[in-house]
Image: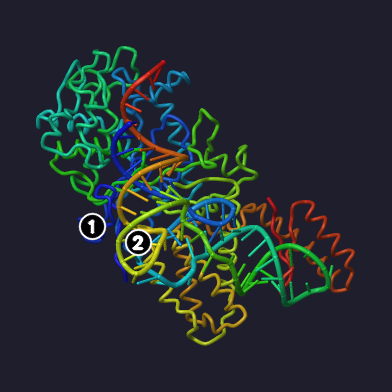
Amino acid sequence: MSQLHIFDSHQGSLQPFRPVQEGHVGLYVCGPTVYSNVHLGNVRTFLSFDLVFRYLQYQGYKVRYVRNITDAGHLVDDADEGEDKVGARAKVEKLEPMEIVQRYTVDFHNVMRAFNTLPPSIEPTATGHIVEQIAMTQQLIANGWAYEANGSVYFDVETYSQTHPYGELSGRNIDEMRSGTRDLDGQSDKRSPLDFALWKKASDAHIMRWASPWGDGFPGWHLECSAMSTKYLGETFDIHGGGMDLKFPHHECEIAQNKGATGCGGANVWMHANMLTLNGKRMSKSTGNTLLPGELLSGDSPHLTKGYSASVARFFIHQAHYRSVLDFSDEALQAAEKGYQRLTHALQTLEKRVGGGPAKGTFDVDAWQERCLDAMNNDFNSPILIAHLFDAVKAIQADQNDNSHLGQEGAAALLGHMRAWMFEVLGLHPESANSTGSGSSQKALDAAMHIVLDARRKAREQKDWATSDAIRDQLAAGGIQVKDGPDGSTYSIQE
RNA sequence: GGUCUCGUGGCCGAGUGGCUAGGCAGGGCUCUGCAAAAGCUCGUACAGCGGUUCGAAUCCGCUCGAGACCUCCA
């Protein structure tokens, strides 16, 4: 079997994955800043790492997955008088900052649940780790990598870069960055425009504030991830992930903080999920080129002709590799939905297979499974995995006509593998294959449809085509499509 | 302006120095009372121009185009 390789964006190449501690994986992913609803781009990132989390577990690793909630410190801009995003939103909405945090944290969790992501092992908040952040800041001052100025503390990039490669992750070099920067109107407490805040003094108007050795203030955005990843995963851990847009400055600063405070760079492997575009363009609130998760599910958007189930969305997202830019469009989603339905129908066919055939079939399930593993071991290549799943679909269908394709053992083995790949690894929902209603209403509809289809069957047996076609047409007008098969008729709801 | 990434058939989207990606759509066929559904099957793409090579869509250079981050501007 092949070994898992991961593309490390720090080294810029595919690397064999070797966990620090055999059998265990420490995974840290930068979570959302909870000052507004999560958008679909965020969802894509978290789905990508959900896949990583799921596959590592499928491989038998015991994974500690830490994904933070940023509820303080993320500034609206990087100017010296930058405003905290949560605090700014609290003013606009006339709410306590923690009401903002609560509202959007709940929204985030609802969305994550809707998309069937597994909850992280630990979900720490920035405000819950002020003590750790102050301690790390003190350590950085003690080590000579930070300085206090007017109640704020800044990381000294110039000094740090003399002995450390600041810019190593994002491929920047300090001279170019320096030359590309201009002095900030002379009011800055920073020694260099490249320096970034570890702790910011809170002005009188600032509502989110904590006591510190430097007076009332709040932590800098980058610091929380360094403090919390170190606390829960150690000074050196396996994988750090996040969206591509966080590579610089956020992750660059994290590395500097980690190295400055502990001497270790934090993660061994850095993974970055790529961005999502809508109709070929970057999502942007100002141009209206945007889509919220809820809008995707409900179809309540000018960009969509209908809603799509979360499983279809997941299937669509995993049909692209996490490191590629993925373009969302109604057309592409419709294509994904049809493909996904074909896949789930094949699985149902396999579940209903009535045995028979030789013990071993001609389709080599073991070799197929190896190919699936190879795909995922190659930097979590889910598109290839899905292509292999469709190979299995063909085999399942061929087996319907000639049960020597799978054979009894092959069918059982394939069923187990298919279920694991689809539900455990890809995180698709077993029930949502047809994206029809659920629960009691679904049962009631099934019962009613059973009567209707039975009446139609009787009409057809008597060659009463007028009646059978009338039933069919009237159901179609009501949005229900009748499908006649060799074993009777089924139906599906047209959306 | 800087750094980086990318440009694949009608659409989405993998991959790669020589061997079919896959899905959707489209053509043909089978099944069927008709239709739908379902199944089978076909399609030879890799931005442009040079170069390296026995051979490149895959490596190198340039051009054009797109995107990300930073900067600039405001």
Q: Is residue A127 above or below residue A376?
A: above
The chain to which mark 2 is attached is: A
Q: Residue A79 carries which label?
A: none
Residue type, label 1: Pro
**Picture quarter containing residue A6?**
bottom left
- A456 with respect to A314 (left or right): right
Disc 1 secondary structure class: loop
- Image quadrant holding the N terminus of chain A, namely bottom left
Residue B11 appears left or right of A160: right
Asked whether the residues under marks 1 and 2 belong to the same chain, the reply is yes
Which element carries disc 2, helix, strand or loop?
Answer: loop
Quickly name the residue at label 1: A19
Residue A245, can we see it?
yes
Q: The residue under label 2 is which amino acid type?
A: Asn
Query: For mark 1, does the 10 Å Cα neighbourhood hold few (<14), some (14 to 19), or many (20 or more) residues?
Result: some
On screen, residue A152 above or below A347: above
Q: Where is residue A193 shown, x and y percent of the image?
A: 23, 23
Q: In this view, does A443 lie to the left or right of A369?
A: right
Q: Measuring 43% from the left and 27% from the top, which residue is drawn there?
A: A100
Position in image of residue B30 (x %, y %) = 72, 77
- Choose between A160 and A27: the one closer to the eye: A160
Q: Distance between the residues labelled 1 and 2?
A: 16 Å
A44 left or right of B54 in image? right
**Res A250 visible:** no
- Residue nearest the viewer, comparing A144 with A204: A144
Question: Foreground residue, B68 or B72?
Answer: B72
Q: Residue at x 85, y 65 (%)?
A: A468
Residue of label 2: A378
Q: Quadrant of residue A365?
A: bottom left
Residue B67 percent location from the top left of the image:
44, 39
